[in-house]
Amino acid sequence: MNKQGLIEAVASSTQLKKVRAEGAVDAVLDCISGALKKGNDVRLVGFGTFRVAQRAASEGRNPRTGETIQIAARKVPRFRAGKELKEAVG
């Protein structure tokens, strides 16, 4: 499912017009992104937790030249599924 499919599913299940459903989906995603940018975790009980993790610097290889390159340390988003989501999928 892509974003458009999610918007259609939200519109269908909530009886909202697609424009309002799109606004709701965008607002939720913006809130999650904003919290992660500030370094906060987003915990949705039963669904999962979004958090920011630090990825250490490492060495890599340029696939074209085989040259060794340095990959800088950076922050990356992580998601850990909650118990209910795991049970629903598995």
Image (cartoon, rainbow, N blue to C red):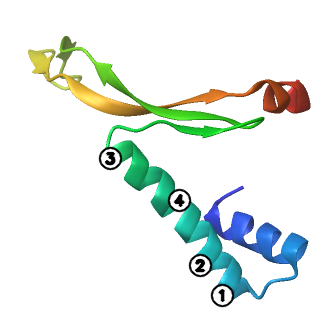
Tell me whether the residue at label 1 lies in contact with that at label 2, contact meaning CB atoms closer than 8 angstroms.
yes
Residue at 72%, 84% in the rendered image: 18
Callout 4: SS:
helix
Amino acid at pointer 3: Lys
Closer to the chain start, of discs 4 and 1, is 1
| Position in image of residue 77 (x %, y %) | 42, 35
What is the CA distance from the residue labelled 1 to the residue labelled 3? Answer: 27 Å
The quadrant holding residue 24 is: bottom right
Closer to the chain start, of discs 2 and 4, is 2
Q: Which residue is mark 4?
A: 29
Amino acid at pointer 2: Gly
Q: Residues within 10 Å of mark 2 (few under 14, many from 20)?
A: few
Callout 3: SS:
helix
What is the CA distance from the residue labelled 4 to the residue labelled 1? Answer: 15 Å
Residue at 59%, 78% in the rendered image: 23
Amino acid at pointer 1: Val
50 left or right, relative to 3: left
Residue 63 vertical placement versus 85 (above, below): above
Q: Residues within 10 Å of mark 1 (few under 14, many from 20)?
A: few
Residue 74 vertical placement versus 59 (above, below): below
Tell me whether the residue at label 2 lies in contact with that at label 4, contact meaning CB atoms closer than 8 angstroms.
no
| 63 vs 7, nearest the viewer | 7
| 48 vs 58, nearest the viewer | 48
| Position in image of residue 27 (x %, y %) | 54, 69
Closer to the chain start, of discs 4 and 3, is 4
